[in-house]
Amino acid sequence: MDTAEAVETVRRALEEKKAEDVAVYDVRGRSSVTDATVAASATSAPHLRALAVAVERAMAAKGERARVSGDAESAWIVLDYADLMVHLFLPDARRYYDIESLWKKA
């Protein structure tokens, strides 16, 4: 699956589960580890888990598997699909870590 298709698959899965503030960054040429980053917020720990499961299922249906770091209790879950990194946060964690400032110009 190419990166654009993966991004669209993730975006649809997140929107179906009512993720908030979904942002997509094309980081080709700016990152040596990935081509795109998606960040989204959840409204609660159960919602955060549901978002992660929805992304994993949507991508698994396309034959893609992620390395997963974090959990709902840590308020930040990362799904690593190599060419695509998906960062799911609770709002306070998203503000605190502010990973998007890394990609503002992307």
Image (cartoon, helix red, strand yellow):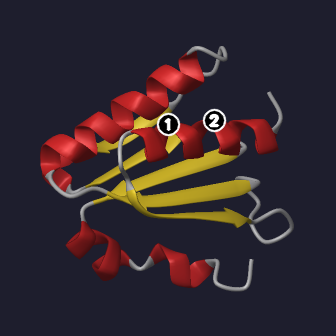
Q: Name the residue under label 1.
A: 13
Q: Is mark 2 on a helix, strand or loop?
A: helix
Q: Where is residue 67 in the image (x, y as percent from the top left)?
A: 49, 32
CA gap between label 1 and label 2 equals 6 Å
Instruction: Please give the label number shown on residue 2.
Output: none
| Image point (65%, 14%), residue name | 63
The amino acid type, in three-letter code, at marker 2 is Thr
**Is 22 placed left or right of 51 in the picture?**
right
**Is 38 placed left or right of 26 in the picture?**
left
Q: Where is residue 80 in the image (x, y as percent from the top left)?
A: 55, 41
Q: Position of residue 22 (x, y in %)?
A: 49, 61
Q: Is mark 1 on a helix, strand or loop?
A: helix
**103 shown above or below 12:** below
| Image point (77%, 36%), residue name | 5
Answer whether labels 1 and 2 touch (C-beta < 8 Å). Answer: yes
Q: Name the residue under label 2.
A: 9
Rate crowding at label 1 as few (under 14), some (14 to 19) or many (20 or more) other CA atoms within 10 Å. many
Q: Which of the two residues, 70 or 11, is positioned nearer the viewer here?
A: 11
**Is 97 placed left or right of 67 in the picture?**
left
**92 shown above or below 3:** below
**Dividing the image into 4 quarters, which one contains the C terminus?**
bottom right
